[in-house]
Amino acid sequence: MISQFKKRKNRTFLANFFLSISASILILTIIGFLIFYNLRIKHKRDELNAQIAVIEQAIEDLQNKNEGLIEKISHVGDEEYIEKVAREELGLQKEGERVLDFILPADQLEEEQGRSFWQPNSWWLWLKNKF
């Protein structure tokens, strides 16, 4: 009878040990999944916050542009503004006025225009300066 008790006690000890190991592995696995998904959610939240910042900046830019357009609309009926636009952008003049154009030296003209890759003149000047 004592030998059966020891065998039974030994079996229950092994069963409890196996059960505790299994429970520990299950708990660690669940904790691992929770940590993994928490990191994934954090990464997604960071991406969304970056998108929000970009969209907020775009909204701010559009609001500034809208304010500028509203200001231009308010000047539409103003005679001085219309005259200024006609003179500066359209090159018009009043009767009896003379328009003077200034010709800049070539060096200064280059600096003002900048060298664009798509302008063949800039290629020619580059080649001319190299050789």
Image (cartoon, grey):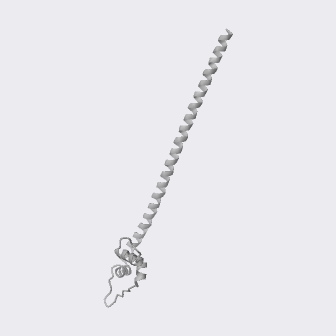
Residue at the (55%, 41%) spot, across then down: 35
Q: Residue furthest bottom?
A: 96
User: Does residue 126 sit above or below 53 in this rendering?
Assistant: below
> Please, which residue is most extreme toward the front here?
131
The quadrant in which residue 116 appears is bottom left
Nearer to me, 32 or 50? 32
Relative horizontal placement of residue 17, taking residue 65 as reference (left or right): right
Displayed quadrant of residue 83? bottom left
**Up/down of 117 relative to 15, above or below:** below
- Residue 41 pos. (x, y %): 51, 45
Residue name at image x 48 percent, y 51 percent? 47
* Residue at screen point 67% across, 8% down: 1
Q: As drawn, is 25 to the left or to the right of 114?
A: right
Q: How many marks?
A: 0
Asked if residue 19 is positioned above or below residue 130 in the image, the reply reads: above
Q: Residue furthest left?
A: 95
Residue reaching furthest right?
A: 2
Q: Which quadrant would the C terminus be assigned to in this image?
A: bottom left
Residue 72 or 14: which is nearer the viewer? 14
In this view, the residue in front, 84 or 31, is: 31
Residue appearing at x 37%, y 74% in the figure: 123
On the image, the x and y values in percent for residue 114 come to: 41, 75
- Front residue (pair 102, 100): 102
- In percent of width and height, residue 36 lies at 53, 41
